[in-house]
Structure formats: C-alpha cells, structure tokens
C-alpha cells in the first residue's frame, strides 16, 4: 500500500549532487512505499520551448537543438556512473515515438506538447536508472498510461474519476516487486493516445491526483525554499514562514499567483483530507509548511509579485456597449487562444483584463479573432502586485513612486497592475 506521495521539481534534480540528495531523501523514507513525481531537470523545459519554436520553422535545426538537450542529460548520466549508451537509447525512443505521432500535423499546440513533454520522460528515466544502480527497488511508470485528459493541448483537463481507477489499478499491480514508483509530473494523454500537458508547473497537480487516487497519508512537495513564505525571499528580506495554512487560504494564495504550488493542487487532496507538506530539499531539518485544516487562525500580509503581465483594453469599434453577448465572444477567444485571465474590469464601452504566460503567437491569434469589431490596446511588461490581508502602510511602501495602471479590491485582497521599475 502506498502511504506517501513525493514531488520533486526541476531545481531538485538539476545537478548530479542534487540528484544524489533526492536519493538520500527517498532512502530516509524507505520504510514507506512511495510514489515519486518528477519534473523536467532545471532549465530543460525552456530549452525544449526553443526546440519547438525552431522545429516549426526548420525541422532539422530544431532536431539539432534537441540533440543538445539529449547530450546535456547524457552528461549527467555519465557523472552519475550510468551506462551512457543504454540511457541514450531509452530516451531517444521517446523522441521517435512523440515526433512520429505528429508527423504531418499542423496543430502547433499538439506538436508543442509532444516536444515539451520529453523533459519529464528524460528526467524520470535518468533518476530511475540511478536509483536502480543504488540497489533500490524502483519501478519506472509512464504517467500517460494513468492520467486521462481531454485534447486541450497545453492546458488539458483531467478526467479525475477515470484517472483514479487507472492509477489505483496500475500502481497496485507493481507493488509486489517495487517499493518506489517513479513517474512523470505535468503529463497525461488524450483518447487518441497523444501526450498532453497540464499547464506550467502542473507536476504539483499530478502529485495531488496520485495522492487522491491512492488515498495516501500525506503529499510532500520538495522545494528550494523553507516552505510557504509571506513573500518571495528573493525579493524581500523581511519574510517569515507560514507554518500552517488552511486549504482555503492555500487555494486563494495560488489563485492570486503565489508560485509555491500549482493552483489546482489543493482541490483533490482537500476532498480526502490529505495533508500537504511543503518542505525544503536543502534544509532537511526544517519542517516546512503543512496545508490542512488548522482551524481558525489569522494571517499576516502575504505579498505576491507576477512579472511580465499583459494589460489588454478592448472597446467596440462602433462605441456600442460591452454587453453579455460581446463578453461571451471575448471569453470564447480567451479559451481558444489558451490565455489565462488574472483580473478584469468592465465598463459601459470597454473591457480591461490582465493576463499572464502569453506568447506572441497566442496574443496575435486573440487580436486577429476580435479586430474586425473591436479595438485592442495591448501593453506588455507590467507587474501584478497582489497583497492578501493587506495593511495600508505596507501597501503604500510597496507602490511608492510606482505608477498604478489598474486596481481591484475584494475581501481583504488588493491587486494592482503597476509599471515595472526600470
């Protein structure tokens, strides 16, 4: 019986030394049967994004860049004392399978998922081979055979009931011969057998799905920070650790952009009352943050900055009202172009929204879909400041000498789009 689910992000496996550290953490919990969810190695996803962009324009150039990603992983395998040839053969099989699945396709979102998903397949294969060489009872499993999704490539919706059945059945089958299951975060597959992805940082969500499906005692997400902090320690010196956080507060924090866990992570485990621990893989003595149901408690101001957000102002060319029918068209285009809206405001003749994680391709498609009857003003490179449980003095200090472009306040939470400091 699986009792715990662990999730390690790319930072935790970015060097041979850190991979050895992950081994030590797993070994220290060897009295429990574990499912371990692994992300792509640090910076791999960005490298594969570049591969994808080049592949669309020049397939051969894209494949050469992909060869470099393979070489980088093979170099780590050598550093860990693994058989380079065996490892290369294993991961090159994934390349052949994924790219052959989209041969001749013009669906850029589909192609992107087949390329971007290689990072998790490479990293989990590497970690599995390393742990096997260390004498651990490990089994590599393909998450795409367990997580069922629709075909909304880039941000697929999970069929939770169907995935629960598959996860439970397939994991149970492996337990007699393995005490540690290694599988991928971020990935799933659709009814056509094509690889899908769950959105950026979706590995946390994967881990929560497994915790829910297996009804485990706890889920631990291992990070390079002590736990959930009141602000990003890279931006602020005066931050403190939140030792206990309620499910509801965690949902609110992630919705408003806190980067410690994926926004969809909480819902599956809350339904089962499963505790989520956010712990440091660097400072193992720290107990980190536990997310659960700690009862009534008060929270200090919690500050979240999102960089490079985009502000879009939309008006009708004929200056008619922005009514429900027009909003329906705008929202449909947002969904079609896979744009994530963070905040919005509607007036009589304009609709303003703030979005993030948008590439030029998606923005262009959004503009093209609306320009016949709408005027769009798109400005990039802003910051979104969110303060939960805010105090006016703290807010005043944060926006001192900054130009505020947009403001929204709701239930002790204030959000401001501000011009980024030069």
Image (cartoon, rainbow, N blue to C red):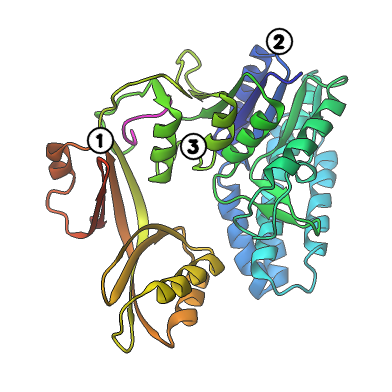
Question: Left of 26 or right of it: where is 263?
Answer: left
**Dividing the image into 4 quarters, which one contains the N terminus?**
top right
Q: Are marks 2 and 1 in contact (CB under 8 Å)?
A: no
Q: Is residue 102 at all visible to an observer of this figure?
A: yes
- Could you tell which of marks 3 and 1 lies nearer the N-terminus? 3
- Disc 2 versus disc 1: nearer the observer: 1
Circle 2 residue:
31
Question: Left of 243 or right of it: where is 401?
Answer: left
Q: Are marks 3 and 2 in contact (CB under 8 Å)?
A: no
Q: Secondary structure at mark 1?
A: loop
Q: Looking at the image, which residue is at 52% across and 35% down?
A: 266
- Disc 3 versus disc 1: nearer the observer: 1
- Could you tell which of marks 2 and 1 lies nearer the N-terminus? 2
Real-space Cα distance between discs 3 and 2?
Answer: 27 Å
**Dividing the image into 4 quarters, which one contains the C terminus?**
bottom left
User: Which residues lie in the magenta part?
Assistant: 226-233
Main SS, magenta residues: loop
Circle 1 residue:
389
Q: Is residue 409 above or below residue 262?
A: below
Residue 167, x across and y down, in percent: 76, 35
Q: Secondary structure at mark 3?
A: loop
Residue 299, x across and y down, in percent: 29, 27
Q: Secondary structure at mark 2?
A: loop
Real-space Cα distance between discs 3 and 1?
Answer: 19 Å
**Which residue is at the front of the view, 273 or 403?**
273
Q: Which mark is residue 261?
A: 3
Q: Furthest-top residue in view?
A: 31
**Which residue is at the front of the view, 44 or 411?**
411
Q: Looking at the image, which residue is at 34% across and 76% down?
A: 322
Residue 103, x across and y down, in percent: 80, 69
Question: Left of 267 or right of it: where is 232?
Answer: left
**Are there few (<14), some (14-19), or many (20+) residues within 10 Å of tag 2?**
few
């Amino acid at each position: 019986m699986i009792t715990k689910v662990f999730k390690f992000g790319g930072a935790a496996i970015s060097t041979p030394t850190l991979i050895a550290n992950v081994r030590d953490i797993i070994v220290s919990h060897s009295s429990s049967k574990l499912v371990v969810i692994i992300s792509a190695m640090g910076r791999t996803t960005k490298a594969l994004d570049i591969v994808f962009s080049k592949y669309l324009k020049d397939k051969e150039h894209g494949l050469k860049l992909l060869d470099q990603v393979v070489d980088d992983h093979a170099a780590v395998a050598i550093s860990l004392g693994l058989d380079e040839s065996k490892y290369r053969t294993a991961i090159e099989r994934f390349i052949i399978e994924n790219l052959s699945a989209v041969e001749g396709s013009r669906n850029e979102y589909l192609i992107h998922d087949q390329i971007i998903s290689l990072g998790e397949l490479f990293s989990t294969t590497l970690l599995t081979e390393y742990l096997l060489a260390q004498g651990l009872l490990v089994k590599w499993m393909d998450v795409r055979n367990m997580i069922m999704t629709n075909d909304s490539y880039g941000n697929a919706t999970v069929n939770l009931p169907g995935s629960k059945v598959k996860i439970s059945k397939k994991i149970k089958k492996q337990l007699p011969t393995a005490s540690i299951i290694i599988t991928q975060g971020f990935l799933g597959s659709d009814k056509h057998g094509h690889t899908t992805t769950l959105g950026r940082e979706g590995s946390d969500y994967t881990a929560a799905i497994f915790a829910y499906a297996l009804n485990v005692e706890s889920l631990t997400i291992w990070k390079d920070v002590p736990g959930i902090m009141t602000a990003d320690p890279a931006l602020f010196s005066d931050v403190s650790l939140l030792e206990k956080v309620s499910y509801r507060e965690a949902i609110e924090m992630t919705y408003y952009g806190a980067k410690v866990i994926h926004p969809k992570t909480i819902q599956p485990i809350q339904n089962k009352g499963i505790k989520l621990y956010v712990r440091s893989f660097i400072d193992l003595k720290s107990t980190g943050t536990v997310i659960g149901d700690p009862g009534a408690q008060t929270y200090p101001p919690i500050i979240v900055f999102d960089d490079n957000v985009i502000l879009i102002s939309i008006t009708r060319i004929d200056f008619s009202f922005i009514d429900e029918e027009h909003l329906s068209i705008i929202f449909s285009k947002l969904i079609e172009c896979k744009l994530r809206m963070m905040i919005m405001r509607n007036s009589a003749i304009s609709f303003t929204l703030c979005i993030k994680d948008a590439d030029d391709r998606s923005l262009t498609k959004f503009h093209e879909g609306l320009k016949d009857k709408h005027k769009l003003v798109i400005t990039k490179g802003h910051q979104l400041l969110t303060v939960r449980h805010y105090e006016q003095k703290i807010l005043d200090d944060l926006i001192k000498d900054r130009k505020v472009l947009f403001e929204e306040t709701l239930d002790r939470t204030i959000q401001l789009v501000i011009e980024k400091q030069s």
